[in-house]
Image (cartoon, rainbow, N blue to C red):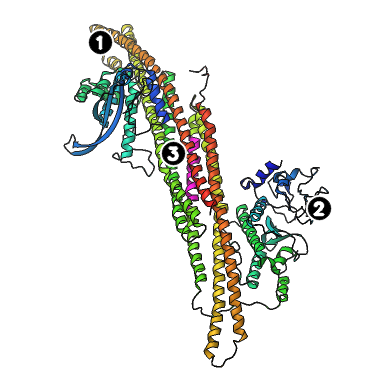
């Protein structure tokens, strides 16, 4: 396992895999943000393993588990290298954690998980969840998720999160005990419901729109990129055929033979080089995907604002109508149409006692209503405040991360071009010796 | 200016070959600079490459008092600038430099110079300046054929004539007839499927022009063919009259009719059989290479289509970003540059690589035919010899008829072997050039892309120092 200085990567990580520059930068930033959690603990998802077992309906299934390792920061800087604490978790447990966080902190743009199923694949990659490349990329994505949560000023303090990292057994039960499940269902319902808000906070409306646009554009980008990757693969691989034919041709030539043969080898090398190129590009695609899913999280936060605003407006509306009713009852005038009013008109007035009772009821309702409005107003304001803080935090993070992603993408392209120049120069040399 | 010029002239990829075929003009003037497209380029004549002005500067030449440069004067046939010693052949003959040549033939000329190993060349031929001719009967293209020579077989040191494909075809047939023991270089395909290929498109005409140029150069390089009277007539006659050619033929004395038929050859001698085998296998390999190249072009074209969609997505993304606006636009621009570079590469492969490859297949066919002819001659000899031997009981000398056959066989074999060696050598150079060119084109493509991405990095890293008042 890798050692690291206190200022550097606070991640043990699988050192066989070389993280790209931007991944490093990402982790550096997270540590610099310096949540108290990360200050005392190093977190990583070190390995992945296949398991078989019986599922809920008692059927055999194969699934993958991931090893979460944690290590106290002090130990590493002291030079000693104790064995890290570790436990195994499945993807579904990560999902459970995230769902919990979504409910517990609705004002936070909760970091997304890596995709459940491989999407935006180009033909060579299988969409198979058991595919080792997919599993590996998922491992990296899960680690990324944990680090993002651990570096969030609010989320990192959560106890459930902490026990996710440290307590293998009984964690699931602990989560369910919070009773978040019930809230989760209503949250989902609310998010999907259609309702019209009269006065949403403009910034949230804009942010929601931004989320929509971001999602749309990144989807498109990923789709086209996948198609382009497919084509690029074809271009490179066909050059491999030159290798074969040059070899055959060199067999019937005298002086030209050597040059042709060696040029053919370079063509083979060229054809083979595309595999690494496209693997690196998958990493870029993963970075984009993270923000594709982030867009969803942003929208959820904005939606929640709409919901709270809507509930406030509903309560306020209800209060107004109750007040109006009271006025009408008190003055005897009917301003608004109501079935009750009509029926009483048709079938005779109420007795003064009945009216008195009604008035009293209304008064209590109005009192309660005013309390409710006050509550909801506070709720709304607080939500707006804390959600906007997190949205600002998110925006800064997004700008930074995507810029880094673009830089590393450009570096990738540069490396690809340099390799191409080298191979063709080699081939050219061989040709010139023909 | 010299150094810069040298690079410029040798940079084939940047110089367009002259004349749009769509410009209908039957005048011989090539000075239609006003057309606005890069047309015929300044000729160097026999000049030192250092003294060659940048081809695209030719238009500014008119009143220039600068000497020692070739100039074009539309309508005037004389070289300007008196007293330039440079404007003459190595042997001192003054050269009329009013006939421009394309830069590509210039380059070809240079390369052929390299190949000659000290041989002094005394015959230079180029094909350029395609023009469309419209008459009531038909529409066709003519090409200018320029010749410069010191050979005494020619009356003048320089010629400039216009020929059409038909004329080239005539020449080739005449050469085959009159020099049956020699390998005649191939011509580009005669028939083109109308409706499938546009015979008057710039690409088609240019591809054909290059092949015709190569054809004449190969003939001009050949120690025997280049002295052929028909060739001479082709290069020099103002009005190539086919009857003139016929007259020439009869003038040549004993007509050499090697065309025999119906003789069965027992077996090809090993060395010629080996040639035949080689040609068969070589044809096969070329076919495979052709298919691979086509496949690559197809894949690249489809990749290009995706890139053309990919780049603009970054642009539309940038439209709703603030801090990321410039980086995203930058990436979009980069992808666009790479797309253009790829387009150029694909075009080059289509227009320069494939045609040369295909022409070689024709060359191989010609060679095979010569081998067959040789077989025929040998077969005739063997049959006649057998007939004589069969009848042999008296000691009669071998009839002259059979002797002549034997001579023919030996002559043919010798010519063929010499031509074969020459052909092999040329093939080696041609393919070296072709494949090196292919490598070069790919290198240029990657270099363009590299430059684009490298120039993007600093702007990507440069964060906006001052955030605006917004947010």
The residue indicated by pointer 2 is B78
Locate residue B106, reporting x and y percent.
Answer: 67, 52
The residue indicated by pointer 3 is A225
- Subunit bearing disc 1: A
Locate residue B407, reporting x and y percent.
Answer: 61, 78
Q: Mark 2 or 1, which is nearer the eye?
A: 2
Tell me how far mark 3 sits from mark 2, CA to CA.
Answer: 60 Å
**Count of labels shown?**
3
Secondary-structure class at tag 3? helix
Residue located farthest toward the left when viewing the structure as drawn: A58
Say which quadrant the N terminus of chain B sits in. Answer: top right
The reply to whether the C-beta atoms of the residues labelled 3 and 1 are less than 8 Å apart is no
Q: Is residue A308 above or below residue B71?
A: above
Which of the 4 image quadrants contains residue A315? top left
The residue indicated by pointer 1 is A350
The answer to whether A296 appears left or right of B214 in the picture is left
Q: Is residue B309 magenta?
A: yes
Residue B349 visible in the current orientation: no
The answer to whether A222 appears left or right of A368 in the picture is right
Residue B340 visible in the current orientation: yes
Q: Which residues are magenta?
A: B295-313
């Amino acid at each position: 396992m890798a050692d690291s200085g206190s200022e550097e990567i606070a991640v043990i990580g699988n050192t066989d895999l070389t993280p790209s520059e931007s991944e490093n930068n990402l982790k550096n930033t997270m540590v610099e943000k310096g949540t108290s959690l990360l200050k005392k603990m190093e977190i990583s998802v070190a390995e992945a393993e296949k398991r078989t077992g019986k599922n809920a309906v008692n059927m055999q299934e194969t699934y993958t588990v991931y090893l979460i390792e944690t290590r106290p920061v002090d130990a590493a800087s002291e030079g000693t290298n104790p064995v890290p604490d570790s436990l195994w978790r499945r993807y579904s447990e990560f999902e459970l954690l995230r769902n919990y966080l979504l409910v517990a902190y609705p004002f936070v743009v909760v970091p997304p998980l890596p995709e459940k199923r491989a999407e935006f694949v180009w033909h060579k990659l299988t969409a198979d969840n058991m595919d080792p490349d997919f599993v590996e990329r998922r491992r990296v994505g899960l680690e990324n998720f944990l680090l993002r949560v651990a570096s969030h000023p609010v989320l990192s303090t959560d106890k459930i999160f902490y026990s996710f990292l440290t307590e293998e057994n009984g964690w699931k039960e602990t989560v369910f005990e919070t009773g978040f499940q019930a809230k989760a269902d209503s949250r989902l319902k609310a998010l999907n419901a259609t309702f019209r808000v009269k006065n949403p906070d403009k910034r949230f409306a804009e942010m929601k729109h931004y989320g929509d646009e971001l999602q749309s554009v990144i989807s498109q980008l990923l789709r086209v990129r996948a198609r382009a990757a497919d084509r690029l693969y074809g271009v490179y691989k066909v050059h491999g055929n030159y290798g074969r034919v040059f070899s055959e041709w060199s067999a019937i030539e005298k002086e030209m033979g050597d040059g042709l043969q060696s040029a053919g080898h370079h063509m083979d090398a060229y054809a083979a080089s595309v595999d690494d190129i496209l693997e690196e590009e998958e990493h870029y695609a993963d970075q984009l995907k993270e923000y594709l899913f982030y867009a969803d999280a942003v929208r959820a936060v904005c939606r929640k604002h709409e919901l709270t605003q809507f509930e406030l407006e509903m309560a306020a509306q209800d209060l107004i109508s109750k007040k109006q009713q009271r006025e009408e009852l008190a003055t005897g005038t009917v301003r608004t149409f109501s079935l009750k009013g009509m029926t009483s008109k048709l079938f005779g007035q109420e007795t003064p006692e009945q009216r008195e009772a009604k008035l009293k009821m209304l008064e209590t309702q109005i009192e309660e209503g005013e309390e409710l409005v006050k509550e909801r107003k506070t709720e709304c304001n607080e939500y707006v405040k804390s959600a906007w803080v997190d949205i600002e935090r998110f925006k800064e993070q997004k700008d930074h991360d995507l810029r880094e992603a673009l830089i590393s993408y450009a570096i990738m392209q540069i490396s690809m071009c340099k390799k191409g120049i080298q191979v063709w120069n080699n081939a050219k040399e061989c040709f010139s010796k023909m | 200016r010299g150094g810069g010029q040298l690079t410029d002239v040798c940079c084939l990829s940047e110089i367009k070959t002259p004349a749009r075929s769509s410009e209908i003009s039957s005048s011989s003037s090539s000075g239609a600079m006003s057309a606005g497209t890069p047309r015929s380029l300044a000729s160097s004549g026999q000049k030192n490459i250092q003294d060659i002005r940048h081809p695209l500067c030719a238009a500014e030449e008119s009143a220039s008092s600068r000497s020692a440069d070739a100039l074009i004067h539309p309508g005037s046939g004389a070289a300007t600038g008196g007293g330039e010693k440079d404007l003459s052949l190595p042997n001192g003959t003054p050269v009329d430099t009013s006939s421009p040549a394309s830069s590509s033939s210039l380059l070809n000329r240079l390369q052929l110079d390299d190949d000659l190993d000290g041989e002094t060349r005394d015959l230079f031929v180029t094909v350029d300046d395609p023009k469309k001719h419209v008459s009531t009967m038909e529409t066709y293209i003519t090409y200018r054929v320029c010749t410069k020579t010191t050979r005494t077989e020619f009356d003048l040191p320089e010629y400039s004539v216009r020929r059409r494909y038909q004329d080239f075809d005539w020449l080739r047939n005449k050469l085959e007839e009159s020099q049956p023991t020699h390998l005649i270089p191939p011509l580009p395909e005669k028939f083109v499927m109308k409706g499938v290929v546009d015979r008057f498109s710039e690409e088609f005409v240019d591809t054909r022009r290059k092949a015709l140029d190569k054809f004449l150069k190969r003939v001009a390089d050949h120690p025997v063919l280049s002295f052929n009277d028909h060739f001479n007539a082709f290069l020099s006659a103002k009005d190539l009259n086919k009857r003139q050619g016929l007259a020439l033929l009869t003038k040549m004395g004993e007509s050499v009719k090697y065309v025999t038929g119906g003789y069965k050859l027992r077996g090809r001698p090993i060395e010629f059989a080996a040639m035949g085998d080689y040609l068969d296998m070589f044809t096969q390999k070329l076919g495979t290479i052709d298919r691979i190249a086509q496949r690559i072009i197809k894949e690249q074209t489809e990749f290009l289509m995706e890139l053309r969609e990919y780049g603009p997505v970054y642009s539309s993304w940038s439209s709703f970003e603030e801090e990321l606006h410039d980086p995203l636009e930058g990436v979009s621009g980069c992808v666009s540059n790479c797309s253009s570079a790829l387009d150029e590469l694909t075009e080059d492969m289509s227009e320069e690589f494939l045609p040369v490859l295909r022409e070689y297949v024709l060359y191989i066919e010609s060679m095979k035919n010569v081998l067959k002819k040789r077989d025929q001659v040998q077969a005739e000899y063997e049959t006649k010899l057998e007939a004589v031997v069969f009848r042999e009981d008296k000691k009669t000398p071998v009839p002259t008829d059979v002797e002549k056959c034997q001579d023919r066989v030996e002559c043919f074999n010798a010519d063929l072997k010499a031509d074969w060696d020459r052909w092999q050598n040329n093939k080696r150079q041609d393919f070296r050039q072709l494949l090196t060119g292919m490598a070069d084109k790919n290198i240029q493509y990657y270099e363009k892309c590299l430059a684009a991405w490298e120039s993007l990095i600093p702007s990507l890293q440069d964060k906006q120092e001052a955030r605006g008042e917004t947010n």
